[in-house]
């Protein structure tokens, strides 16, 4: 620590392997993963509990359910109903039936079985694919001509309609 502080104060480059012991990082990660408490070990009040959990492997279904679990980061003791209720934007993303009973009811949600999350995928190839299959682009859509058309959303953005 003092080595890093001295290098910063004198505006010199520093070698990170000399300034930080690898055992400090290793022991901190081992402690956090083992106990589920993330934060400073000495300040237990400021650490966040329950961040890591032991994976439930009773059955394949319970393992899959545990891996697809999401947690709403608000207090369990609150009586606020809105975060616990289903919202129409959850359609196809959140399972409407699976939630624990008790204080965590509605705060712990599971991804729907057919929900598939991709990260960093551009939406242009998907939109081009849909246009080739007769999707009408939103800019060219006239609601009075076909009011019952099905809206097409890509990554939460309304891009067109299909008749």
Image (cartoon, rainbow, N blue to C red):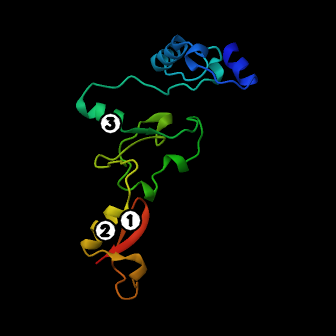
Q: Position of residue 18 (x, y in %)?
A: 58, 14
Marking on residue 128: 2
On screen, residue 115 above or below 13? below
On screen, residue 116 above or below 137? above
The residue where tag 1 is placed is 153
Q: CA distance from mark 2 to mark 3?
A: 34 Å
Marking on residue 65: 3
Q: Position of residue 73 (x, y in %)?
A: 54, 38
Q: Depth-wise, is mark 3 or mark 1 nearer the camera?
A: 1
Task: Name the residue: 36% across, 63% down.
Answer: 124
Element under disc 3: helix
Q: Depth-wise, is mark 2 or mark 3 nearer the camera?
A: 2
Element under disc 1: strand
| Quarter of the figure that contains the N terminus | top right
Q: Is residue 78 visible?
A: yes
Closer to us: 78 or 6: 6
Q: CA distance from mark 1 to mark 2?
A: 13 Å
Element under disc 2: helix
On screen, residue 154 above or below 146? above
On screen, residue 53 above or below 75? above
């Amino acid at each position: 620590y003092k080595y890093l502080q001295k290098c910063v104060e004198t505006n010199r480059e520093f070698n990170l392997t000399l300034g930080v012991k690898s055992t400090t990082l290793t022991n901190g990660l081992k402690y956090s993963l083992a106990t589920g408490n993330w934060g400073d070990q000495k300040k237990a009040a400021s650490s966040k509990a329950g961040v890591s959990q032991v994976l439930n492997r009773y059955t394949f279904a319970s393992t899959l359910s545990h891996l697809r679990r999401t947690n709403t980061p608000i207090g369990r003791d609150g009586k606020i109903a809105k975060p616990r209720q289903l919202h129409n934007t959850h359609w196809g993303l959140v399972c409407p039936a699976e939630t624990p009973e008790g204080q965590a009811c509605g705060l712990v949600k599971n991804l729907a079985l057919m929900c598939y999350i991709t990260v960093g995928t551009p939406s242009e190839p998907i939109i081009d694919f849909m246009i080739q299959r007769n999707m009408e682009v939103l800019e060219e859509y006239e609601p009075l001509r076909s009011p019952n058309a099905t809206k097409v959303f890509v990554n939460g953005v309304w891009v067109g309609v299909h008749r």
